[in-house]
């Protein structure tokens, strides 16, 4: 079988790119392990593939809306595809800002948004992973399709343990989310004092590792100082390191954010605190090999994401009514602590 070359476009947030990794093993299973897979994603998420030998080349697209004539990134992608046309191009982006680019890319076959071959999920409320999967359903066998799930490859276990002096058993808390710096109420956020209370409850039983990005120091300073039984890795990890740290943890506790999606993709037990967002659509993805616990207050007004109800909410009650004790009991009942 001759080597196939495939280009994939997914330029969203970290969670969006994690969803898109469901196609990687599917392509390798269907077309052979020598299949050459390239990705187009954002500069912020591109390092996700640093340790992933399944991916050959990563193109970054910083400015999505800039016309091709003014975009160095877009012209680089098009020029590369012209010099060496792809056998297949898979488009996971439906925004109109991508339309000119996806039509300009040179490939023998194109599938996904804007092209024939898109078979939408039959579910009335499909998870985003299932929507992604439905875009490539027609090019793989049913057996391969049914076994396709998001999967990540990060820094190896021993390298992680030595680099960050991690114990054999630890639990991760990821208190922040991508909406943390917006100048308005962060509807996905859990109260700072709740995080502090939860950490105090957990650290009596297990080493707690705190993770977050280096540009979130102001937020984490509100949670500090941490006790000696807490390992503070905020701003100290690369994306592949973060994947490795999460993969080797007993569990991860987070709100609806990228780290929760990473946990589900590396089959680490995840406890997701979710209020306004629809967990069945955008929460961490459940597969036959992982454990996903959705912790909610169960309010009638939830989920309300991007609705008038959310716009009118000034108190974030769906997150406030999830208590530290409730989360601790959920983790304890799973025998994590």
Image (cartoon, rainbow, N blue to C red):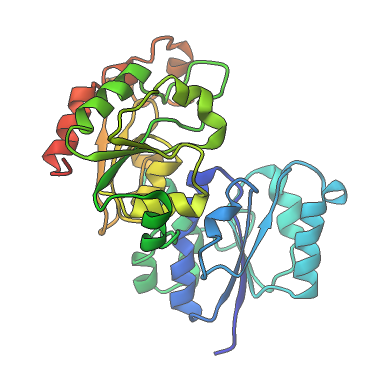
Position of residue 72 relative to residue 258, above or below, is below
Q: Nearer the viewer, residue 90 or 283?
A: 283
Q: Toward the viewer: 328 or 220? A: 220
Give the vertical position of 102 relative to 308 (above or below): below
Residue 126 in sight from this viewpoint: no
| Residue 312 left/right relative to 209 | right
| Residue 64 percent location from the top left of the image | 72, 44
Q: Quadrant of the C terminus?
A: top left
What's the residue at 71%, 57% (across, down)?
102
Measured from the top left, where is residue 50 in percent x and y? 55, 60
Name the image quarter holding residue 299.
Answer: top left
Residue 319 falls in image quadrant: top left
| Observer-nearest of 155 and 186 | 155
* Residue at image location 42% in from the left, 26% down from the top: 188
Rendering coords of residue 326 (x, y %): 18, 26
Residue at 33% x, 17% y is 193
The number of numbered badges drawn on the structure is 0
Q: Does 262 appear above or below 23?
A: above
Q: Position of residue 265 (x, y in %)?
A: 38, 54
Identified at 36% across, 61% down, the residue is: 157
Say if residue 11 shows up in the picture: yes
Q: Residue furthest bottom?
A: 1
Q: Quadrant of the N terminus?
A: bottom right
Q: Nearer the viewer, residue 7 or 249?
A: 249
Does residue 40 lie above or below 123 as drawn? below
């Amino acid at each position: 079988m001759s080597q196939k070359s495939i280009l994939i476009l997914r330029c969203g947030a970290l969670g969006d790119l994690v969803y898109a990794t469901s196609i990687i093993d599917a392509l390798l299973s269907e077309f052979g392990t020598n299949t050459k897979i390239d990705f187009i994603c954002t500069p912020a998420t591109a390092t996700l593939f640093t340790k992933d030998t399944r991916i050959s080349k990563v193109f970054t697209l910083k400015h999505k809306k800039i016309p091709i004539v003014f975009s160095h990134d877009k012209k680089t992608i098009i020029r590369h595809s012209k010099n060496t046309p792809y056998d297949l191009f898979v488009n996971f982006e439906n925004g109109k800002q991508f339309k000119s680019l996806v039509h300009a890319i040179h490939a023998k076959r194109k599938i996904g948004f804007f092209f024939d071959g898109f078979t939408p999920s039959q579910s009335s409320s499909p998870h985003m992973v299932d929507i992604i999967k439905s875009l490539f359903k027609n090019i793989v066998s049913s057996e391969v399709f049914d076994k396709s799930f998001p999967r990540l490859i990060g820094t190896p276990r021993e390298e992680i343990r030595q680099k960050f002096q991690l114990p054999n058993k630890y639990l991760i808390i990821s208190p922040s989310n991508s909406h943390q710096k917006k100048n308005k109420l962060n509807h996905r956020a859990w109260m700072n004092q709740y995080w502090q209370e939860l950490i105090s409850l957990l650290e009596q039983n297990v080493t707690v590792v705190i993770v977050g990005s280096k540009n979130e120091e102001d937020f984490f300073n509100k949670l500090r100082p941490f006790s000696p039984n807490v390992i503070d890795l905020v701003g100290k990890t690369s994306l592949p390191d973060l994947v490795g740290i999460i993969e080797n943890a007993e569990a991860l506790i987070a709100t609806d954010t990228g780290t929760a999606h990473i946990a589900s993709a590396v089959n680490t037990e995840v406890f997701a605190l979710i209020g306004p967002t629809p967990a069945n659509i955008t929460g961490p993805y459940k597969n036959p090999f992982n454990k996903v616990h959705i912790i909610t207050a169960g309010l009638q007004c939830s989920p309300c994401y991007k609705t008038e109800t959310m716009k009118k909410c000034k108190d974030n009650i769906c997150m406030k009514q999830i208590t530290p004790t409730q989360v601790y009991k959920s983790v304890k009942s799973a025998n994590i602590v």
